[in-house]
Image: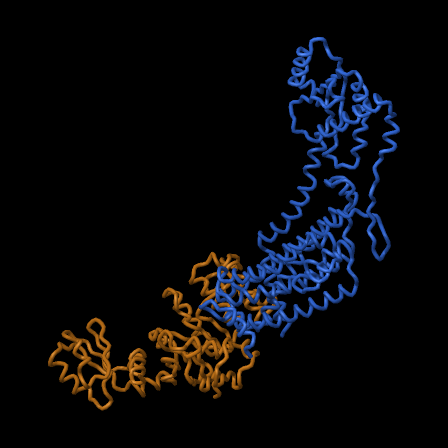
Amino acid sequence: MTPILELRSVRKAYGDFVAVNGVSMSVPAGSIFGLLGPNGAGKTSTIRMIMNITAPDSGEVVVFGHPRTSDDLRRIGYLPEERGLYRKMTVMDQLVFLGEIRGLRGPALIADIQRWLERVDLAKWAKSKIEELSKGMQQKVQLIGTVLHTPDLLILDEPFSGLDPINQELFRDLLLDYRSKGKSVVLSTHGMELAERLCDHICLISSGRAVLDGELKAIKRRIGGNAFRLVADGDLGRLQEMPEVEQAIVQEGVAKLMLRPEVQGADVLRQLVGFLNVHEFRSEEPELEQIFLKVVNDAT
Amino acid sequence: MQLKNVAVIAKREYLQRAKTKAFWITTLILPLFVTAISTVPALLLSNSKASQKIVVVDETGKVGSTLVAKMNSGEIEKQQAGKSRDQMVSFDAETEPPAPDRTAQRKALDRRVLDKQLDAWVWIAPGVFADKPVEYHARSVSNVFTQEALKDEISTVVRQARFRDAGIDPARVDALSRSVKLETQKVSASGSRAEGSLGAAMLAIVLFFILYISIIMWGQQVMQGVLEEKGSRVIEVVISCVTPFELMMGKLLGICMLGLTQLAIWLTTVLVVTTPGLVAAVMVLPAGVSLPTLSPVMLINFVLLFILGFLAYATLYAGIGASFNNLQEAQQAAGLAMMFVIIPVMVMYPVINDPNSRMATVLSLIPMFTPLLMPLRIAIDMPPIWQLALAYALTISFVIGMVWICARIYRVGILMYGKKPTFAEIWKWTRYA
């Protein structure tokens, strides 16, 4: 199946600073694709090139199976990281405008907007000015503006930042719903936990480079074969010093361990009981965070 | 460029601004203000035009009765027919012979003034034929027009008495010392016609300032609009759907249409106010001035030059808005743009005085000045067709060039955040592919 979006060795530099250094990635149709990485990794720069806001210095952006044209942009819904709406416009006027610049018109557009506003619980704010709304409400308005023209591809830059848990859940449901209609979603985030719950494909970016790219399950199988969960009392800090342990993330008596590939779990446990009061030690699927840290460490 | 996109942007710019109270306040306040200052004083004064009750005491016995007869005859009003209504004065005068006790008589007259039986009394002492002044006693001594009229009247009567004493017939003096009148004739291609030159100048000044205010105000609106889009980052969403050029053109078009709407309201006011009958009835006009009406040729040129002037300045402001991050940063560059509008203001009076001087001709052909100076010249004296054609050709080329350069600055600038760019950097943006 042709990917809905593909980047081929895309590079962008601002003066001496290379923001995106030859990133390649491939977004399968009908997936939720996570563009992951810490702040400043180059996620937004990458997205801006996808959206033709800035041009890549080299490399190619392929959408819907062909090099991107300006008409393709109408089939994409884009939520920028820096949110912004016309402050003095009413919610309805604002959404009508956002629909119109994507070629939507007339009563069908109004009806669509009303349906969406009801769905996100903003119907009674339709005639209010944007500046009268809370940040979270504004974000919902902007999300409606992004999906109004039912784009085949949604590109959301940090969509969950600034949302309360209830609205995060609402956004998540909307995205899953969107995928179930056969559409594709690319979202950037630095929150690994959210990405883990939502994405089926990921691309990890660190310092402008794609360090990992593929299906999340396959990645976990490939990289995280030797992950263990340990619940114990005692000096968990010593875990870091063990040569068999590649990575240990310790949090309130629970340690997530990543062992070296050749190491057996049973051997490690034997050592652990020597200095810890172990309650639990079992093999488990590694979390995205662990994988991310491992990959970034390996890369540097 | 897709016109559909330009239309959507223009529609938003127009409707959102037309919905604001600020637009309607500025649009309606100016005509109201102009109408008010031109009619209210006249209306107020016309009601207070009661006759002045005056007693004249003449010690010489030579001028009192003639003076009172003249004052009551309404002759003064006739002499003042050229003056506007608020300057007209009429009297209801009577003489009183000097009493033996002058001091008691003066006191009695003062009391009548205080009791409001009289407005004033005048005492003409014998020394008046030498250089002794005539006394004027009144509750209010600030009514300069009344005093001026009275002084003229007394002077005439005293002068005539002096002539008679010297054995000269005053009627003969009047006949021989008539002054010459100057009748202004405006010479134009359509034939000479009598017209108040001051009226033409007034109309020209009104038109000039309407254009001046519109161009500055709407140019600034464009700049603020661009800065707002940049500041709120709406720009990123919009730019993912329409090209920067479409966005800029839509913005210019929408705001230009709104400017024209406002202009239509203002020009209608000017048309109504300059309708001859109406003006004569209410407006305060200096002697001998008649307002010329706004001719269709003037109107067409005026609207075309507004559009060109708007585009020339608004594109510049759009480029400035796109280059900077906020109003404070942009203000400095906007100040430079203002210099172009200030020069026409500085040369406005010389141009009105001699609309065909070399300076007026040359300056009115410079594109940034044409939209302001050409209407001024047209209102006063239609310039030769070749000059008008040249001015249009130059301004249109200039506007096209401005749109081209500013569109390039705009395209790069609207997505540049952060550091305030230098002029050298902004210039570099125009040469990006």
Q: Residue B324: x and y, percent?
A: 50, 65
The answer to whether B36 is drawn above or below residue B418 in the figure is above
Residue closer to the observer: A159 or B286: B286
Which chain, by letter, is orange? Answer: A
Please tell me in which quadrant of the rendered image residue B379 appears. bottom right
Name which residue lies at 55% across and 59% down.
B335
User: In the figure, is residue B419 to the left or right of B155?
Assistant: left
Q: Quadrant location of the C terminus of chain B?
A: bottom right
Name which residue lies at 74% across and 41% down.
B285
Which chain, by letter, is blue? Answer: B
Name which residue lies at 19% across and 86% down.
A244
Q: Residue B369: x and y, percent?
A: 66, 61
Question: Please, which residue is most extreme toward the bottom here?
Answer: A262
Q: Residue B108: x and y, percent?
A: 67, 13
The answer to whether B36 is drawn above or below residue B302 in the figure is above
User: Residue A191: in sight, yes or no?
Assistant: yes
Residue closer to the observer: B238 or A291: B238
